[in-house]
Amino acid sequence: MPLFEPSAPFEMLCPKSLGIANELVIDDDRFGSDVDGAALAEYSQLFGLYDMLCAGDVVADDLFLFQYRKFISPVIGGGLESVSPWVRVLTPEMAPPLFPGLEQLAALKSRLSVGSVFDFGESLSANYARVHVVDDFVMFVAACAESSQMSSADVKSFATIRGIIPSPALCYIEVDLFIRIMRILKDVWEHYSAHYQLARSGYQRRVSGYLLERLHSYLLCKWLLDNTEPDIKVWQRYVITDSLAVSAPGTVKGNEELK
């Protein structure tokens, strides 16, 4: 459940039942015994939502997607500065006034609102190798090349782009655009899962989620730069934490914020 009280009603996407009225259970084990659905992280539930929207089991014109401890907001500069320049930190008590309400969301004119881009100062592939297993990125790029959803130019740009939109799944988005993004991500993941994915343990277990996050970010950056989807707004990204540790004057580091 959210670490704060959202200021609008919401549906809870979850891999197991929480016994609440507003839950939509999308099980990580639905892919069969050969696939670790938990390796997808939140993309397991996002793919499930995509399937339900395509089937008409869920009907909506637009979505505001947030996580139990993260959301984006049109309110810029609230909260406390973080050691990570792309996010600001909130306590659970600080969060509700900054969470967008139904009237704010209904008044939006853009097709998509996301958090800001962070420039690594190096390629996406080089940066991935710093904290993850680079072999996985190489094999994921191979899956991208095999997918009918990506051109050779897309594959090259994906591996060499310098920036990322951290947590690109946190967004306000029109449903047709959400479906377009998830169709590409799911197709690439199916190639990767069937032919290339190696099971990882510990922090690296969510390898598919890490890779899909980067491809998701690339697609948004590409469409913004080439004017495919020009109507993209940039909102503030927030993370909620129960404990704040002062790390420098005017900045804080949340206990979960860098994951």
Image: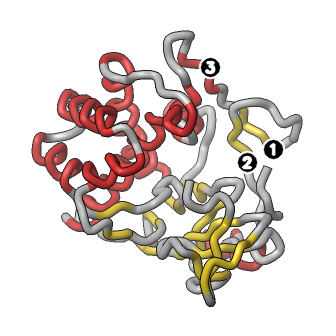
Quadrant of res 224: bottom left
Q: Position of residue 59 (x, y in %)?
A: 60, 43
Residue 75 visible: no
* Residue nearer the viewer, 143 or 222: 143
- In the image, residue 218 sits, relative to residue 147, either above or below, namely below
For label 3, the residue is 29
Mark 1 packing: few (<14 Cα in 10 Å), some, or many (20+)? few
Q: Residue furthest front?
A: 247
Q: Which mark is residue 22?
A: 1
Label 1 secondary element: loop
Residue at image point 63% right, 71% down: 253
Q: CA distance from mark 1 to mark 3?
A: 21 Å
CB atoms at circles 2 and 1 under 8 Å apart?
A: yes
Q: Is residue 194 toward the left or the right of residue 46 in the image?
A: left
CB atoms at circles 3 and 2 under 8 Å apart?
A: no
Mark 2 packing: few (<14 Cα in 10 Å), some, or many (20+)? few
Q: Is residue 206 toward the left or the right of residue 28 in the image?
A: left
For label 2, the residue is 11
Q: Which badge, 1 or 3, is on the more N-terminal residue?
A: 1
Quadrant of res 117: bottom left
* Residue nearer the viewer, 75 or 164: 164
Residue at image point 88% right, 35% down: 19
Q: Is residue 49 toward the left or the right of residue 145 in the image?
A: right
